[in-house]
Every structure is written in C-alpha cells, then in structure tokens.
Image: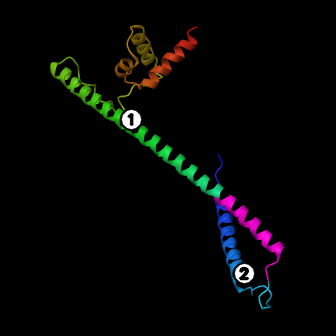
Amino acid sequence: MNFPSAEVILLQTGLEILLAILLALLLWRTWRRPPSGQTGTGAAVPEELQKTIERFLSESEKIAVTFSRNLEEKKNLSSDLILKLDSRLASYRALLAETERAMEASVRKLAEIEKEGRLSPPPAQATQDQKANPAAPEVRALVLKLHREGLKLEDIAVRSRLHRGEVELILELERQFDI
C-alpha cells in the first residue's frame, strides 16, 4: 500500500488553498454582480471559467477524500503495529522474568552444591606468563591425551591452561592431518 509522500501532501494542501481562494473570488464576484438587466462595474464570471472551477472543485474533493482515506488507513496500520509491538514487549518481559527466576534458582542450587562440597571452586585465572604455549609439542600431546580420555573441551582447556578455541584448533588440526 502506497501512502502519499510529503510532496504530494504539500501539493494537495497548496491546491486546497488555491481552491479556497478561487471559491472566495467566485463568491465575491457573484455577490458583486448586479441584478439582471442592470449594468454594473463587476463583470460576470465567464461560463468556461465557471466550469473549470467546478471541475477543479470536483477533483479537489476527490483528492481530499482519497487523502483522508489514506490517513485513516495509516492511522489504523500504526495502531495495529503499536498493539503488536506492545504484545511482543509484554511476552519478552514475561520471558525475561522467567529467565531471571530460573537464573536465581540456578544460583541458589549452585550455592547449595558448593556448601555440600560437591563442586570444587573454579581454578584461579592463569596470568599471561603461566599460559601454556599451544605450539609446544608437549602441550599438543597433553590436549590429545586428555581428548582421548574423553574429557570435555572446557576441562581440557583448564588442565592444559589454554583457551577453549586453542584446544578446538589443536583437535581440528589433528583430525585434518591424522587421515
């Protein structure tokens, strides 16, 4: 659905103003016209000009009706869109609240597990000097050994003091060249 652009609206407004001026001029001249049979200073509006003005008025009315209909459609579409956005926003808020509740429950459960001693605290973050060199053959061998033992990538990364991406890279390279 195409809506009128700003230029069309401006043109229509200008035409309506011109129409109002012409209508006022027509009424003014009609009122100034002397009764039939009398001569006066005012000239009668030529019939051709009157027909042109009537056609202009008719076309302007059609344009105004179309413009009003388009504005009403745009208003309805905007209202529908706002209602849909409000609905989605409400559902996102509900999902967020549910996620926050689940996260709080997970944090409580994790705290309980830590209190019971079933979970060891995470290892201290290694400094840059303590990071392993992923290119070193012994590091590569350790990563492959831990992978063969079935450890998860995160556990391999912690034990080998590498980032998970480095572990994935070593394993992928091994798969490619171990054919």
- Where is mark 1, residue-wise? 91
Q: Residue at x 79, y 69 (%)?
A: 52
- Distance (Cα) linking label 2 and label 1: 65 Å
**Local SS, label 2:** helix
* Residue 63 magenta: yes
Q: Residue at x 38, y 20 (%)?
A: 154
Placement of 71 over or under 53, stated as above or below: above
Magenta run includes residue 3: no
Q: Which residue is mark 2?
A: 30
* Residue drawn at point x = 54 percent, y = 17 percent: 173
Q: Which mark is residue 139?
A: none
Q: Is residue 81 left or right of residue 106?
A: right
Amino acid carrying mark 1 in the image: Ser
Q: Earlier in the sequence, mark 2 or mark 1?
A: 2
Question: Which span is picked out in magenta?
Answer: 44-64
Give the percent coordinates (x, y) of residue 3: 64, 52
Q: 35 or 156, which lies in front? A: 35
Give the residue drawn at x 65%, y 55%: 66
Q: Residues within 10 Å of mark 2 (few under 14, many from 20)?
A: some
Question: Is the Cβ of the residue at disc 2 closer than 8 Å to that at disc 1?
Answer: no
Q: Amino acid at mark 2?
A: Thr
Residue 119 picture quarter: top left
